Image (cartoon, rainbow, N blue to C red):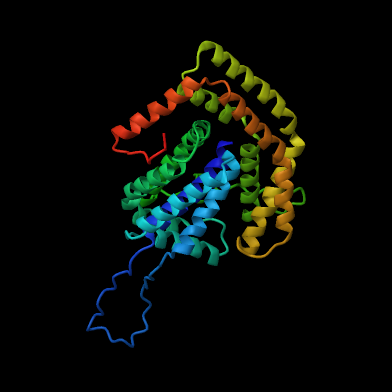
Amino acid sequence: MIGPLRWSSITIIILLTSLATGWAQPASQPAPDPATPEADDAPRPVELKLTIEPAFARGIAHKWGQSLKERYELSDDQVERIESGLTRRLLAEARRSNAVTQSLLEATISSTLTGSTGWSPDDAKAFGRRVESELPAMRKTLAGFVEDVRGPLTPGQKLRFTADYAAFSIGYVDFEKRIKNWSAGKVGDNPNLFWDEPSATPTTRPDGTVESKELANARQYAKRNAEWQLNRSTYWEQYVKSATAYYGFTDAQKNAAAAVLKDCLERVKPYQTAERRRELEEINITESMCYSVNGAGSFAPFLTDLWERRREIMSPIDNLDREFKNRIQELAFAEQIAAGEKAVYEKMEKKGYKPRPGAK
């Protein structure tokens, strides 16, 4: 499930990171040029002050907290602690100022006004040039957000979160490389914050008509996303490797984990049919085309029905995903759980981290 995970997690965390590092103090405005009359109507850039209110920070933290609750089966107390930590960090980090948020908003608004579902090459270049210098600060802020989430989790939940974050990290490294390439002017014809891909080739129908660029891109997106939604082998195999290293599984435990993996991969096959793939692709195409012609924030009630149908299609796969992870975790002995946890905290403490009381 690396694909959807990358999309949702990167979107949320980059949003949080940019908000935290970019919700700034008033932008300094240059003094007016005395030689330039105030009546001059020549367009000039205007920078706006953005303010993050505590209620807004809590709203963002709550949104993420609820998604984590469902994914990791968290208790209400765990969610409350996570949301509290994220809120405090957002407000603390927001006191620093940089161009990330304004650049992100400008590029997004520009693409919306032009009716595009992606960014233009010029928007991407400008964003890269303005944001490249902020990447170290974003990475530091991201590390703080990750620790806010990880702290209240149980050992088993931390294992799952670590595996998920490993998949996310791959995408985040790609994001940083992409920003550096954009800053250097290396931008493709279909720039996207989360992956590089060329524009799709429009299909010529039997009657000789050529489909629109928007529909061609929607088909390409739909096919890729359906593959991510249905595939489990790569992610589950990586999860077993992470669990083996984290717990220090014995040969017997490794064999048992391999058996669990084999069993779940066989049981997921009935849900990975060509028919399900086609239906997911059609849902994805409809959603993408609706956003393309109607705007992502516009009111389209039928999308709710599509999302519900997608949830129904994915439900048995998601249920099996939870079962698989629980079975892998149950293979670990109590002493292995304690040793794995101890090793992680020792590594963090060498980097200057001091756990909160009761975290161990």
User: Is residue 130 visible to us here?
Assistant: yes
Rendered location of residue 301, percent (x, y) = 72, 61
Q: Quadrant of the N terminus?
A: top right
Going by the image, does 260 lie left or right of 354?
right
Residue at image position (37%, 73%) is 46
Outermost residue on the left side: it is 34
Quadrant in the rendering for residue 100: bottom left
Horizontally, residue 168 falls left or right of residue 272, namely left
- Give whichever of 323, 280 is nearer the camera: 323
**For the point 46% across and 43% down, which residue is it?**
149
Could you tell me residue 259's position as x and y percent? 63, 17
Q: Nearer the viewer, residue 210 or 328?
A: 328
Residue 211 in view, yes or no: no
Image quadrant in which the C terminus is located: top left
Give how far across and how far down residue 272 sits, in percent: 71, 33
Q: Which x, y percent locates residue 83?
A: 49, 51
Q: Quadrant of residue 294?
A: bottom right
- The one of 276 and 224 positioned closer to us in this rendering: 276
Query: Measuring 36% from the left and 72% from the top, which residue is drawn there?
Result: 45
